[in-house]
Amino acid sequence: MTFTKRLAISALALASVFALSACTDSGAGAPSAAPVAEAPEFAAGTTMAKLSEAGKITIGTKFDQPLFGLKGPDGTPVGFDVEIGKLVAAKLGIKPENIQWVETVSANREPFIQNGQVDLVVATYTINDARKLVVDFAGPYYQAGQDLLVLAGNKEKITGPEDLAGKAVCTVSGSTSEKNIAAYTTNVLATDTYSNCLGPLRSGEVAAVTTDNVILAGLADQNKDEFEVVDKPFTKEPYGIGLKKDDAEFRTFINDVLEESFDDGSWAAAWKATAGKVLDTPTPPAVNRY
């Protein structure tokens, strides 16, 4: 995957981070890559039937992740995760304008699902065993890898996490990245959003920011000529769609939607309309039918 391919995205450059509890309807933004199903039928009592009959769905996503989930200047989140959410909603017969988007940061994704504050979470959400104890996942729909963001020019010659010994690094509290980087350094500045790591990196308070490579690529593209991605991923991060624990029928439905989108081109179209403006189009991962 190439991180040097650049294309200006003016909407991203104007975006800002909003409060944790903020939410918005998706009346604007990128058009969904899939048509909305007309009068779909589902077994009575299933989550699919309830959402389809209600004609609306609440989806948690990031609001500060360029390319994947970023709140645009019109108040609507845009990005690949947002488009994946729209694909699922479309198969339920729910129009994009009837999706309520709720900001979910790394630390509150599981509680929001467990408490019913959201129906789904599509938020650069790595599937792992610890999280599967409390929520279920459909997918993966994308596989990323943890990497490092440094100042342009990389004067400290950081080529991987092994070079961080004795150096400070910034990441997000409650993220998989925070747990992974602890194996290389204990000097970790943990904040609530990755955008809040950019100031410490600019000032020299930290030597690097670490999270998934695609997130870092979006931050670098949004702040041209300031930062660069080391481009040496050192983990595998399968992104999944989080949902309530033990809702096997809903998980199967979402997996079916994802696999269909891989085959009919709507997944690739969603990528090209968002992250594909900066990154090459990858091969879809195999869905895990656990």
Image: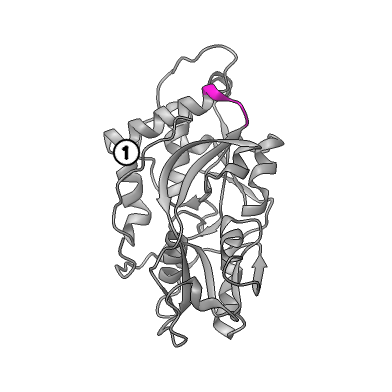
Q: Main secondary structure of the magenta part?
A: loop
* Image quadrant where residue 37 sits: top left
The residue under the point 56% across, 53% down is 62
Q: Residue furthest top?
A: 44
Q: Is 268 above or below relative to 246?
A: below
Residue 57 location (% of width, % of height): 57, 33
Q: Is 184 above or below relative to 102?
A: below
Q: Is residue 120 visible?
A: yes
Residue 281 location (% of width, % of height): 29, 52
Instruction: Inspect the image, locate mark 1, and give the three-letter code of the amino acid beneath it.
Output: Ser
* Residue 271 part of the magenta-drawn span: no
Residue 279 location (% of width, % of height): 33, 60
Viewport quadrant of the N terminus: bottom left
Q: Residues within 10 Å of mark 1 (few under 14, many from 20)?
A: many
The residue under the point 47% across, 70% down is 148
Name the residue beneath numbered marker 1.
266
SS type, badge 1: helix
Q: Magenta segment range?
A: 245-249
Residue 99 location (% of width, % of height): 54, 37
* Image quadrant where residue 226 sits: bottom left
